[in-house]
């Protein structure tokens, strides 16, 4: 099966264990080896940075007339969970994942957060195996093919909200982590967003970053319904 995935991503690994590691979810690593360090989480961390840098470089060079704020929103759209999950589905990445029994029964193969993390992990695996050329090849082929030139696919609500709020002086937005739930491999974070110390939005997500986006979206709906 892993050979099929190599064909799908059009890259042959010299060290196939890197790709296997990229497909190993923390639930499987904890269940099989009782060691989360053997999961794809470290690769995900690296892949996230590589992806952000490559996309930022592409946007900077391709859109010299776009201001920083617009480039930021475009980059956020291109590397967000929904976009990466679509890439994973195109590659049928879900069926190659190694999941723990609980995550398997819970529909983990189709969960956007797990699929998006796996894409970032595969990018890192390509980088470690073949350098930036290999990582670039993957990003160019599967992510830079659908650039939101006119309309964003998935809005960066945090940035959009910040820009709207800053139209008035002395406005202070703050995100506060107020709760966590679930096992280590499937955490849910709860974030409250305050504007001048008043709660204007609450968000829940599989990471603090995603919970903050959800809170910003809720605040946009409440404060600027015409802009949301």
Image (tube, rainbow, N blue to C red):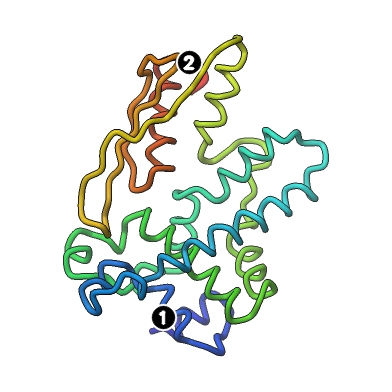
- Label 1 vs label 2, nearer the camera: 1
Q: Is residue 2 above or below residue 183?
A: below
Relative to the observer, which residue lies in front, 45 or 140? 45
Residue behind mark 1:
20
Q: Quadrant of residue 193?
A: top left
Residue at x-position 68% and y-position 34%: 70
- Image x and y of residue 79, in percent: 55, 51
Element class at badge 1: helix
Q: Is residue 178 above or below residue 223?
A: below
Say whether disc 1 or disc 2 marks the residue closer to the N-terminus: 1
Q: Is residue 155 left or right of residue 67?
A: left
Relative to the observer, which residue lies in front, 175 or 124? 175
Number of other residues with Cα within 10 Å of mark 1, as a class: few under 14, some 14 to 19, many 20 or more = some
Q: Is residue 178 above or below residue 38?
A: above
Q: Is residue 14 above or below residue 138?
A: below
Mark 1 and mark 2: Cα distance apart in space? 45 Å
- Image x and y of residue 119, in percent: 48, 64
Residue at x-position 21% and y-position 55%: 183
- Image x and y of residue 182, in percent: 20, 50
Residue at x-position 25% and y-position 43%: 180
Relative to the observer, which residue lies in front, 134 or 10? 134
Residue at x-position 64% and y-position 57%: 145
- Image x and y of residue 121, in percent: 48, 67
The single residue placed furthest to the bottom in the displayed view is 14
Q: Quadrant of residue 41?
A: bottom left
Q: Is residue 29 left or right of residue 92?
A: left
Q: Which mark is residue 224?
A: 2
């Amino acid at each position: 099966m892993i050979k099929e995935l190599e064909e799908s991503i059009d890259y042959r690994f010299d060290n196939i264990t890197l790709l296997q590691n990229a497909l190993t979810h923390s639930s499987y690593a904890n269940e099989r080896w009782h060691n989360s360090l053997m999961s794809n989480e470290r690769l995900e961390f690296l892949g996230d940075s590589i992806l952000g840098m490559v996309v930022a470089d592409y946007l900077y060079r391709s859109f010299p007339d776009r201001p920083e704020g617009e480039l930021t929103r475009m980059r956020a759209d291109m590397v967000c969970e929904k976009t990466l999950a679509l890439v994973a589905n195109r590659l049928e990445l879900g069926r190659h994942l190694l999941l723990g029994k609980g995550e398997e029964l819970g529909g983990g193969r189709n969960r956007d957060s797990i699929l998006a993390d796996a894409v970032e992990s595969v990018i890192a695996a390509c980088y470690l195996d073949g350098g930036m050329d290999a990582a670039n090849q993957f990003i160019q082929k599967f992510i830079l093919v659908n650039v939101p030139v006119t309309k964003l696919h998935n809005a960066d609500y945090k940035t959009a909200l910040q820009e709207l709020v800053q139209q008035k002086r002395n406005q202070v937005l703050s995100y506060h982590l107020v709760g966590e739930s679930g096992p280590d491999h499937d955490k849910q974070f709860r974030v409250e967003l305050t504007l001048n110390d008043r709660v204007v939005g609450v968000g829940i997500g599989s990471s603090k970053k995603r919970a903050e986006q959800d809170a910003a979206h809720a605040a946009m709906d409440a404060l600027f319904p015409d802009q949301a």
